[in-house]
Image (cartoon, rainbow, N blue to C red):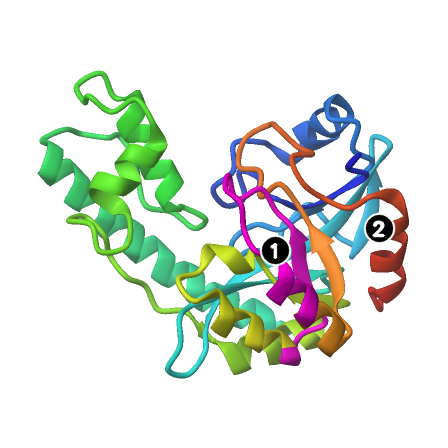
């Protein structure tokens, strides 16, 4: 399928490698016409409107927010067409303070574990991929791939892992419903319990139907959820680098998505 709209992309505002100014060129390289910026737990300060055009590329202002259902596994929800409210800004400020402190602890743990100085400072927007890239790029480590750093050190349950506080599912839905035109579940088959994750979609508008998991998945439960809850299908590459268009929507599917985003 030709990807017209890549609706899951990260920038340096969180843990991506691209500046916002680099997104249009990356989109053209991939023959993508629409990109949603969905940085982790942050709105992009240089996107003043829910949907805008930058160098000929339509940019949807979005967010990927980690939330925790009561008694359940943490999941990510995607908000599209963001128009920030004071309540959402306050919650994101709280989350970023926690992320910054968590980053400081992870950096200290990795440096102590490996006996190196990574040259990183904790800051808002810092994520584990930043730490992993610093480990790979350090001349005194043997790591060559980011995935190995996660597997050995900073993945969930790893020796350098630090958990963080996240927004409750109910509060996250409330905040994003007020600030965004459409909210949906991200990458349902990345969770340990995809069935439980998909059950949450009864409270949402959309679900990420197209996503490159790097493996085969049984999409029948996903299709049932779309039908049962009248969900808007979304899709995206979850790009943290400059490569867009690995997954996303066709032009007709984007038109359906766009008509559902209430601004």
Could one spot residue 163 in this view of the protein? yes
In this rendering, the answer to whether 106 lies above or below 227 is: above
Q: Which residue is mark 2?
A: 254
Residue drawn at the location 57% of the way across and 70% of the way down: 198
Image-based side of 20 in relation to 42, left or right: right
Q: Which residues are magenta?
A: 202-224
- Left or right: residue 66 compared with residue 253: left
**Of label 2 and label 1, which has the lower sequence position?**
1
Q: Is residue 71 above or below residue 246?
A: below
Looking at the rendering, in which quadrant would you find the N terminus? top right
**Mark number for residue 43?**
1
Frontmost of labels 2 and 1 is 2
Indicate yes or no whether the magenta region holds residue 66.
Answer: no
Disc tally is 2
Residue plotted at (60% across, 32% down)? 19
> At 52% across and 38% down in the image, what residue appears?
16
Q: CA distance from mark 2 to mark 1?
A: 22 Å
In this orientation, which residue lies closer to the viewer: 221 or 179? 221
The crowding category of the residue bearing disc 1, from other C-alpha atoms within 10 Å (few below 14, some 14 to 19, many at least 20), is many
Residue 149 percent coordinates (x, y)? 27, 36
Could you tell me residue 164's position as x and y percent? 32, 63
- Judge whether residue 85 can be spotted in this image: no
Numbered tag placed on residue 255 in the rendering: none
Q: Is residue 204 one of those drawn in magenta?
A: yes
Q: Position of residue 46 (x, y in %)?
A: 68, 45
Query: Are the residues tagged 2 and 1 within 8 Å (C-beta)?
Result: no
Residue 99 in the image: x percent, y percent?
Answer: 37, 57
Q: Residues within 10 Å of mark 2 (few under 14, many from 20)?
A: many
């Amino acid at each position: 399928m030709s990807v017209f709209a890549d609706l899951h992309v990260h920038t340096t505002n969180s843990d991506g490698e691209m500046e916002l100014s680099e997104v249009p060129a990356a989109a053209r390289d991939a023959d993508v016409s629409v990109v949603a910026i969905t940085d982790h737990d942050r709105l992009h300060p240089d996107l003043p409107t829910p949907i805008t055009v930058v160098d000929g590329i339509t940019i949807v202002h979005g967010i990927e927010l980690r939330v925790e259902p009561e008694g359940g596994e943490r999941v990510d929800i995607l908000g599209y067409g963001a128009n920030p409210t004071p309540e959402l800004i306050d919650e994101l400020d709280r989350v970023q303070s926690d992320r910054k402190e968590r980053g400081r602890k992870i950096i200290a743990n990795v440096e102590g574990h490996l006996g190196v100085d990574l040259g990183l400072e904790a800051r808002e927007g810092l994520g584990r991929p930043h730490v992993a890239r610093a480990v790979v790029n350090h001349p005194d480590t043997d790591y060559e791939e980011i995935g190995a750093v996660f597997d050995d050190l900073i993945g969930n349950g790893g020796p350098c892992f630090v958990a963080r506080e996240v927004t409750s599912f109910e509060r996250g839905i409330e905040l994003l419903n007020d600030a965004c035109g459409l909210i949906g579940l991200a990458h349902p088959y990345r969770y340990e319990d995809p069935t439980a994750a998909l059950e949450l979609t009864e409270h949402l508008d959309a679900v990420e139907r197209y996503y490159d998991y790097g493996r085969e998945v049984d999409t029948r439960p996903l299709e049932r959820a779309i039908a049962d809850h009248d969900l808007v299908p979304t899709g995206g590459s979850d790009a943290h680098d400059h490569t867009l268009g690995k997954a996303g929507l066709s032009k007709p599917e984007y038109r359906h998505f766009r008509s559902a985003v209430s601004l």
